[in-house]
Image (cartoon, helix red, strand yellow):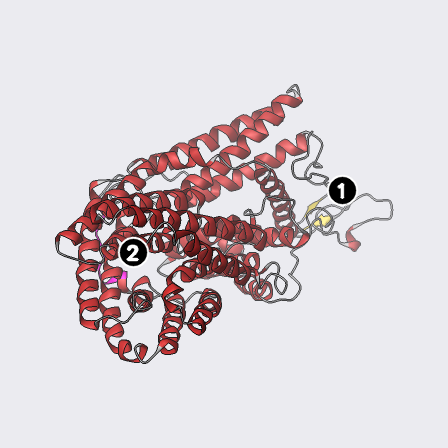
């Protein structure tokens, strides 16, 4: 494990220009963009044909669920999408009932802020991923300010549920064609990032630290994707796991890595063809590469006769490359067994994961409520715009929250100008309005990967066009109201983020690292003690596996606050690697894995009892 010590607490500079810098588009930017169009178009066009386009906001609530879980394996995606749809329906139900019972704007803003806080905390605890709570908050907050009766609520919920089912089908549609597409993409990104770091480290180029951080983050994300499905891994996922381990090996020894080979593996993985094999550590016997001319007929090995060569017990001569390759295979095998042991550990209950997120929930509730109240005080008719703006700001740390505030303001200001240009076209008729909404949906998802502000340029006219589904409204009033609410939401929301910090996040990561270290040392001692009982060995293995799972969840939940230590992401990945090798040692101690150097097949299976 790295011996680097964490940096001292400090105040970080808040970026402005850097927050607006465009990045590279996502490799699969077209997937969510096409998915949301496919999910929104049929229900909207059907309602238009029936002359009930005023109901389209409810179907769109379900359709927007198609934006989620594109990075998840399909088995996990099916569950995540189902839970997102249920969460959307739950928030929508609360909003519709509240709107039916009262028209008091202060009460409705309070309900919206509490919903936003719950949605933020649950999405962070379950690591739903982009667009996380923002879409759910937008749906529920907007519904709060639509005139409603209790009798209408069931029908509106039914429309949202039907559209949600259609969105689920759209999200799962690629599964028959590319059943392991998300895992392949994550693995390819890890390999490419490792290759980029190896090239940077070899050439001594500037930005080596950034390339290393990006590579460790990509490897970490790949493991998240591969471990998202907890059932017995398929042969394909096992092969992908080996490739991710090779990326880890390249990070540990960049001077010995072959960037061209890593990139070739990445290209092969991204396609639909056969996944390249790095050598099966369970069966590959050429890790000890034997030279035929080094064996005597009597089986006694000759003496070393070349630089970098040594004699084996069987008489073979090994060069340094063979020894290094054999070491990589042993490392790979141990990592695979450790990953399997980690996968067998059940995730922590949701309640225990929500506890550390209390500051985040308080921050969201306070910021959203204050933004809505200030907007009401200024005479706004749609205070939920300010509420949603505040909700969209809250990221893993204050620096990112500030960047998001800058991006949101710039994107919305440009977006209202785009709406002013598009509005005359949208008001030509219902079909023109639906087509403009679809175009904004596509543009938002196509551009948001480059920078949030660029996607907001399309999100803003989209939100304004949705308000015109029940009937056209004066463009000037919509533009003015949106600008004011954006500025109010960004300012008040950021002040709340500064006031309510989450300083404990970094300390939790340090404690999780310490717990993994101690659990690994304990498991190693138990595995090395020939007198240890089977029950003690099993307890040590499960304790270490649980500690590794907790470390990953803790690191994902906290990226460091404004004035606290930076997250030691490299230490997190190295701790996971060391723990996986120790887990393999405990499995080997129980006779489920042969000792290093043997060529027999190991028989460890996930969840196997000793």
Q: Nearer the viewer, residue 299 or 568?
A: 568
Residue 80 x, y percent position in the rendering: 50, 50
Q: Is residue 564 left or right of residue 481?
A: right
Left or right: 528, with 513 as reference point: right
| Category of crowding for the residue at label 1, using alpha-carbon neighbours closer than 10 angstroms: few (below 14), some (14–19), many (at least 20) | some
For the residue pair 129 and 544, the one nearer the viewer reads as 129
What residue does disc 2 label?
A: 147
Q: In the rendered view, would you say 508 is above or below 59?
A: above
Any mark on residue 521, and which?
none
What is the secondary structure assignment of the residue under circle 2?
loop
Residue range (magenta): 11-19
**Snapshot quadrant of residue 558:** top left
- Residue lying furthest right: 297
Q: Nearer the viewer, mark 1 or mark 2?
A: 2
Q: Is residue 8 magenta?
A: no
Q: Which sits in the foreground, 582 or 159? A: 159
Residue at left offset 29%, top offset 47%: 112
Q: Residue at x 36, y 59 (%)?
A: 207
Q: Give the image location of residue 20, x and y in percent.
A: 27, 64
Q: Which residue is mark 1?
A: 600
Q: Give the prevailing secondary structure in the magenta stretch.
A: loop
x%, y% of residue 534? 66, 23
């Amino acid at each position: 494990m790295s011996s680097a010590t964490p940096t001292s607490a400090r105040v970080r500079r808040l970026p402005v220009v850097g927050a607006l810098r465009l990045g590279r588009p996502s490799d699969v930017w077209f997937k969510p963009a096409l998915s949301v169009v496919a999910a929104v178009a049929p229900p909207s066009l059907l309602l238009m044909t029936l002359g009930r386009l005023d109901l389209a906001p409810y179907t769109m609530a379900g359709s927007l669920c198609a934006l989620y879980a594109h990075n998840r394996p399909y088995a996990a995606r099916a569950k995540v999408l189902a839970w997102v749809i249920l969460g959307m329906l739950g928030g929508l139900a609360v909003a519709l009932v509240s709107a039916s019972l009262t028209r008091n704007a202060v009460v409705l803003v309070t309900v919206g802020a509490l919903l936003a806080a719950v949605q933020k905390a649950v999405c962070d605890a379950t690591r739903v991923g982009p667009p996380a709570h923002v879409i759910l908050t937008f749906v529920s907050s907007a519904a709060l300010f639509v005139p409603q009766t209790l009798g209408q609520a069931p029908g509106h919920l039914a429309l949202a549920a039907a559209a949600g089912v259609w969105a689920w089908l759209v999200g799962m549609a690629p599964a028959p064609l590319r059943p392991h597409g998300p895992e392949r993409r994550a693995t390819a990104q890890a390999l490419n990032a490792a290759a980029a770091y190896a090239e940077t480290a070899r050439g001594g180029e500037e930005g080596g630290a950034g390339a290393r951080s990006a590579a460790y983050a990509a490897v970490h994300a790949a493991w998240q994707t591969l471990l998202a499905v907890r059932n017995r891994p398929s042969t394909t996922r096992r092969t992908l796991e080996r490739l991710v381990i090779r990326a880890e090996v390249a990070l540990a020894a960049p001077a010995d890595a072959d960037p061209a080979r890593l990139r070739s593996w990445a290209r092969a993985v991204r396609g639909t063809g056969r996944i390249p094999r790095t050598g099966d550590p369970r069966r590959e016997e050429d890790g000890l590469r034997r030279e035929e001319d080094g064996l005597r007929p009597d089986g006694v090995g000759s003496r070393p006769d070349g630089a970098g060569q040594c004699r084996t017990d069987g008489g073979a001569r090994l060069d340094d490359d063979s020894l290094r390759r054999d070491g990589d295979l042993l490392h790979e095998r141990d990592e695979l067994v450790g990953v399997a042991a980690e996968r067998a550990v059940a995730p922590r209950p949701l309640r225990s994961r929500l506890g550390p997120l209390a500051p985040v929930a308080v921050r969201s509730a306070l910021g959203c409520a204050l933004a809505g109240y200030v907007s009401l005080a200024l005479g706004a008719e749609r205070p939920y715009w300010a509420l949603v703006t505040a909700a969209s700001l809250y990221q893993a740390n204050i620096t990112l929250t500030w960047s998001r505030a800058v991006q949101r303001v710039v994107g919305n200001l440009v977006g209202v100008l785009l709406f002013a240009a598009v509005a005359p076209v949208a008001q030509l008729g219902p079909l023109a309005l639906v087509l403009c909404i679809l175009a904004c949906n596509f543009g938002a998802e196509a551009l948001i990967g480059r920078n949030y502000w660029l996607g907001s340029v399309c999100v803003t006219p989209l939100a304004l066009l949705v308000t015109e589904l029940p009937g056209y409204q004066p463009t000037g009033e919509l533009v003015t109201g949106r600008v004011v609410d954006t500025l109010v939401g960004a300012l008040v929301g950021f002040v709340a983020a500064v006031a309510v910090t989450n300083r404990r996040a970094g300390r939790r990561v340090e404690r999780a690292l310490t717990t993994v270290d101690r659990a690994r040392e304990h498991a190693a001692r138990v595995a090395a003690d020939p007198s240890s009982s089977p029950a003690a060995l099993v307890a040590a293995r499960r304790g270490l596996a649980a500690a590794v799972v907790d470390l990953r969840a803790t690191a994902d939940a906290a990226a460091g606050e404004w004035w606290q230590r930076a997250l030691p992401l490299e230490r997190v990945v190295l701790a996971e690697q060391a723990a996986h090798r120790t887990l393999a040692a405990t499995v080997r101690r129980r006779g489920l894995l042969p000792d290093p150097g043997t060529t027999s097949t190991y028989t460890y299976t996930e969840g196997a009892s000793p």
